[in-house]
Amino acid sequence: MTYEELESLVAKNANSIASLAAEGRETDLKMDKLSEQINGVTKQIGGIDNNIGYHAEQFFQNVLANKKVFGGIKYDDIFFNMNHREKVEFDIVLEEAKKYGVGIIRQSGDGIEVDATGLKAYR
C-alpha cells in the first residue's frame, strides 16, 4: 500500500467517523424528543387513572351514603376517607353498633373493584 493510498484511506475513515458522530447527535436529539413525549403521555395516563379512581370512589360513596347497606348488612353510619395515624387511609368505613366494615375502592386492569374482604366485625 502506497503512502497516497494510506492517506486516502485515513481521509475516508475520518469522513465516516465525522458522519457517524453527526448521526449520533441527531439520534440523541430524536431520543430526547421521544423521551419528552413519553413523559407527557405518562402524565396523561396517570391523570386519567387518578380521575377514574376518584370518580369510582365518589360513585360508591354516593350509593352507600344513601342506603348505608353493603353485603346485605344495614349500617348505622358511614365515614369517608378516614385517616389512621397519617399512614393509612380508608376510602369507606361503615359502622353498625360494634361492627365496622372497611371498603377499599381501586381500579385494576379489569375495571373498578371494591375490596370487601375487610367487612368483618371489629370491636
Image (tube, helix red, strand yellow):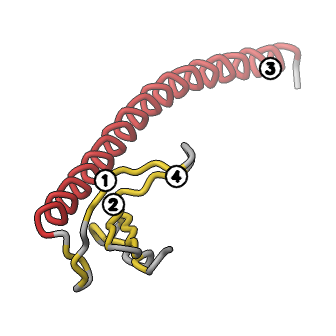
Identify the residue under disc 1: 80
Query: Element type at marker 4?
Result: strand
**Location of residue 117 (image quadrant):** bottom left
Q: Which residue reaches farthest front?
A: 97
Mark nearer the N terminus (3 vs 1): 3
Q: Nearer the viewer, residue 5 or 20?
A: 20
Q: Nearer the viewer, residue 97 or 9?
A: 97
Crowd rating for badge 3 (residues with CA inside 10 Å; few <14, some 14–19, many 20+): few
Identify the residue under disc 3: 5
Mark nearer the N terminus (2 vs 1): 1
Name the residue rendered at 73%, 15% in the picture.
11
Please report contact status of discs 2 and 1: CB closer than 8 Å, yes or no: yes
Report the amino acid beneath label 2.
Answer: Ile
User: In whole angstroms, how far apart are the C-alphas of marks 3 and 4?
Assistant: 76 Å
Where in the figure is residue 14, as x and y percent of width and height? 72, 17
Name the residue rendered at 88%, 15% in the picture.
3
Q: Nearer the viewer, mark 3 or mark 2?
A: 2
Q: Nearer the viewer, mark 3 or mark 1?
A: 1
User: In whole angstroms, how far apart are the C-alphas of marks 2 and 4?
Assistant: 12 Å
Q: Nearer the viewer, mark 3 or mark 4?
A: 4
